[in-house]
Image (cartoon, rainbow, N blue to C red):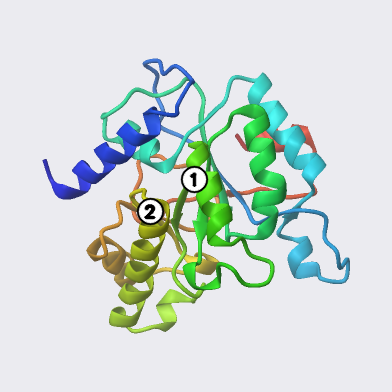
Amino acid sequence: MPILKLIIFLALSLEFCFFTTPFVKASATNVPILMYHYVANNPNPKDKARDSLSVSPDKFDSQMDYLSKNGFTPITLDTLYGIFNKQVSSPAKPVVLTFDDGYIDFYTIVYPILRKYNFHGVSFIPTGLIGGSYYMNWNQIKEIQASGLVTFEAHTVGHVNLPSLSYKDALKQMQDSKNVLSAQTGYPVNFIAYPYGTTNSSIQAAARAGGFAGGLGTWFGKSTGGGMNMPRIKVSGFWSIKEFASRL
């Protein structure tokens, strides 16, 4: 068995120790990967950049309630990989919940809501920023990891614009984040979200060389088969539940 598939198999084995939702044989060729950043009320209404990346806690809870009541099963990226590679069966309505940057509101707001619904989530961590202002610390990440509800994946060390770096430096940013995160959580790190969604063929080749099974961008669309630049659906804090549902 190739080493990468073995690592994915081990990750799936660890994941299913926690997974309580039964899987059924179903086709999963268009899987929505939802993208969140801040799940919190913007403390500075003049900060329009943050406003565009924020979803209020009430709206987030309503969105999770909608998923729960309408038969969606949030899965990890390891499971998505397994589905696309016919290693595991799919739930009837798979969805991936992703959260970028490791902000403290993931610990104080998102994680309790995920527990409320027994939902899986994926948190992309810039390892060099953890423990700083506005970010989670390693103890909080380990506490969440122990629940089995969240997997932590790479987001480089310093949340850098990867195409602006040399191949060597970009590879180091990705590999170092992968290694540190895996050492801290004790869980295989198989995926990377490119900061700012910026990537190119060289960066994707570096990600493969760094041992990643897949990469995620920020361009709109549903995932149809994995790859090194998978699309995501950026969730807007301005959407109604009807608008949210229309994107799934």
User: Which of the pair 90/172 is nearer the observer?
Assistant: 172
Q: Classify residue 166 as left or right of residue 72.
A: left
Q: Classify residue 49 as left or right of residue 171.
A: right
Instruction: Please report whichever mark, 2 or 1, sits nearer to the chain's N-terminal start.
Output: 1
Q: Classify residue 207 as left or right of residue 65.
A: left
Q: Which dot, 2 or 1, sits closer to the camera?
A: 1
Q: Mark 2 = which residue?
A: 191
Tell me the SS state at disc 1. helix
Residue 24 horizontal/vertical position (percent): 40, 15
Residue 202 horizontal/vertical position (percent): 30, 72
Q: Amino acid at mark 2?
A: Phe
Which quarter of the image is occupied by the C terminus? top right
Tell me the SS state at disc 2. strand
Residue 144 horizontal/vertical position (percent): 55, 45
Q: Amino acid at mark 1?
A: Gln
Residue 192 horizontal/vertical position (percent): 41, 58
User: Which of the pair 7/86 is nearer the observer?
Assistant: 7
Q: How much space separates mark 2 and mark 1, taking CA atoms?
A: 16 Å
Q: 222 above or below 207?
A: above
Residue at image position (35%, 56%) is 228
User: Which of the pair 167/233 is nearer the observer?
Assistant: 167
Q: Which quadrant holds residue 171?
A: bottom left
Residue at image position (65%, 24%) is 68
Residue at image position (82%, 71%) is 47
- Density class for disc 2 (Cα within 10 Å; few <14, some 14-19, many ≥20) is many
- Residue 192's disc number: none
Q: 221 above or below 23?
A: below
Q: Mark 1 = which residue?
A: 145
